[in-house]
Image (tube, helix red, strand yellow):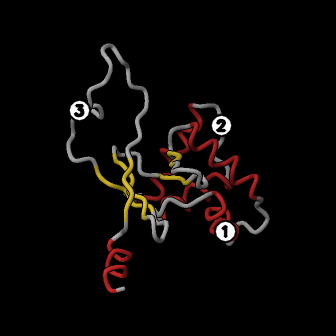
Amino acid sequence: MLQETNSEISSRNCNETISQKGFRFTAQRREVYDALLVKRDHPTAVDVFMRVQKKLPGISLATVYNCLETLTECGLVRTVNHDRQPSRYCANLAPHAHFFCESCGAVFDVPSGDSGPATAGWQLPPGAVVTHHEVSFQGQCEECAAHASKS
């Protein structure tokens, strides 16, 4: 019996998820999704375009935007927004927050501290129904903080 690689399993699951929403898992969508999985650094659409263009030289930035929109709509990717900066994309669907380094601009995943509901510890208005939440932190990453302390 042949063992499937994580990439093959991920591609099959992605194909099923996209098909359920009425889309096809095209070669372009596959490359865009793979670019997000290979390097989980919360890239912008332009960053994804630069990575995918190496494998698909004829792809346009508009196509990358459309692929990211479809992957987000299908629930395979999350859009991460911070202040007035360009949107970034995250393939980590586990509950987590984000840390934004104010010095270098890096974005890091911050795992959730517990396995309880996302609203645990927050005092929401009575009867509120949460459909989406975002938590973010900002400051300096370890490398930038170390560099700043030497200055």
Tell me if label 3 and label 1 are in contact, CB under 8 Å.
Answer: no
Which residue occupies 76% across, 52% down?
A: 62
Which type of secondary structure does the marked residue at label 2 adopt? loop
Q: Nearer the viewer, residue 70 or 85?
A: 85
Q: Earlier in the sequence, mark 3 or mark 1?
A: 1
Relative to 14, is 122 on the left or the right?
left
The picture places residue 118, in percent across and down from the top left corner, at 30, 34
Amino acid type assigned to the residue bearing label 3 in the image = Ala
Disc 1 designates what residue? 50
- Label 2 packing within 10 angstroms: few (<14), some (14-19), many (20+): some
30 is higher (above) or lower (below) than 115: below
Which type of secondary structure does the marked residue at label 3 adopt? loop
The picture places residue 124, in percent across and down from the top left corner, at 31, 24
Q: Find residue 43 and report its image quarter.
A: bottom right
Which residue occupies 70% across, 68% down?
A: 53
The picture places residue 64, in percent across and down from the top left corner, at 69, 54
Q: CA distance from mark 1 to mark 2?
A: 24 Å
114 is higher (above) or lower (below) than 131: below
Amino acid type assigned to the residue bearing label 2 in the image = Phe
- Label 3 packing within 10 angstroms: few (<14), some (14-19), many (20+): few
User: Viewer-nearest of labels 3 and 2?
Assistant: 3
Relative to 61, is 111 on the left or the right?
left
Relative to 29, is 9 on the left or the right?
left
Disc 2 designates what residue? 23
Disc 3 designates what residue? 120
Q: Nearer the viewer, residue 37 or 24?
A: 37
Q: Earlier in the sequence, mark 1 or mark 2?
A: 2
Which type of secondary structure does the marked residue at label 1 adopt? helix
Amino acid type assigned to the residue bearing label 1 in the image = Met
Q: How many marks?
A: 3
User: Viewer-nearest of labels 3 and 1?
Assistant: 3
Q: CA distance from mark 3 to mark 2?
A: 35 Å
